[in-house]
Image (spheres, helix red, strand yellow):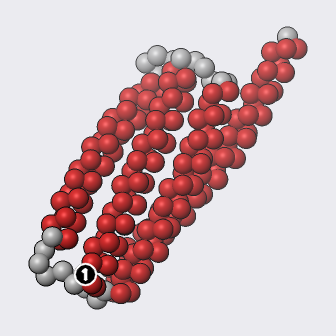
């Protein structure tokens, strides 16, 4: 199977990324809708107390962080769509690809910070309110920690890959000038 060009692996990945972009957009909209409905219904309930108000604020903040990570993920996917579009057009050593990779790196690190913020928020939430299951609380924290570390490592890895890619472009340009 061809890697570059029309009807190649890169064109199929581009299509898959477009579908993923649509799905995440839809999930962000659904999550935002349900979060808004839930928070407003809890906020307007007659049994609200000060402690309950802080719970609603914390739940809303954590929900907003998750929605923000989805939005940032959309920007990452969009950058990858641009990269694979270039690959489909046989534009492998383009300087624009390094710009796209640089953005992906920064956005991945931003998602890492968003998950770290969420981890801190959930830790506060689970400490201040009686939780149902200690194992579930622990697993939630571990899962968010794994996502945090994964996005930090992914961001740093893409940054390193981008520098290697820049060097490859420089070598190609030097090679083109010598011929």
In the figure, is residue 36 to the left or right of 165?
left
Residue 2 seen from this side:
no
What residue would you read off at disc 1? 52
Q: In what element is the residue under mark 1?
A: helix
* Residue drawn at 43 percent across, 32 percent down: 13
Which of 93/63 is in front?
63
Question: How far across and how far down the image is residue 109, in percent?
Answer: 57, 55
- Give the position of the C terminus as an image quadrant: top right
99 is higher (above) or lower (below) than 154: above
Q: Quadrant of residue 36?
A: bottom left
Residue 12 seen from this side:
yes
Label 1: few (<14), some (14–19) or many (≥20) C-alpha neighbours in 10 Å: some
In the figure, is residue 131 to the left or right of 48?
right
* Residue drawn at 50 percent across, 67 percent down: 116
Question: How far across and how far down the image is residue 59, in percent?
Answer: 31, 70
18 is higher (above) or lower (below) than 8: below
* Residue drawn at 27 percent across, 43 percent down: 26
């Amino acid at each position: 199977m061809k890697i570059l060009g029309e009807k190649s692996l890169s064109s199929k990945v581009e299509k898959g990324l477009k579908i993923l972009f649509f799905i995440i957009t839809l999930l962000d909209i659904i999550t935002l809708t349900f979060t808004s409905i839930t928070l407003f219904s809890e906020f307007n309930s007659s049994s609200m107390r000060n402690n309950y108000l802080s719970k609603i604020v914390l739940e809303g903040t954590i929900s907003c962080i998750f929605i923000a990570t989805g939005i940032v993920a959309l920007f990452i996917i969009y950058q990858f769509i641009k990269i694979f579009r270039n690959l489909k057009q046989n534009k492998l050593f383009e300087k624009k690809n390094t710009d796209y990779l640089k953005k992906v790196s920064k956005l991945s690190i931003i998602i890492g910070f968003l998950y770290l913020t969420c981890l801190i928020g959930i830790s506060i939430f689970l400490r201040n309110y009686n939780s149902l299951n200690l194992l579930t609380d622990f697993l939630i924290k571990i899962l968010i920690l794994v996502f945090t570390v994964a996005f930090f490592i992914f961001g740093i890895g893409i940054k390193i890959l981008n520098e290697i890619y820049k060097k490859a472009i420089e070598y190609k340009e030097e090679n083109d000038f010598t011929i």
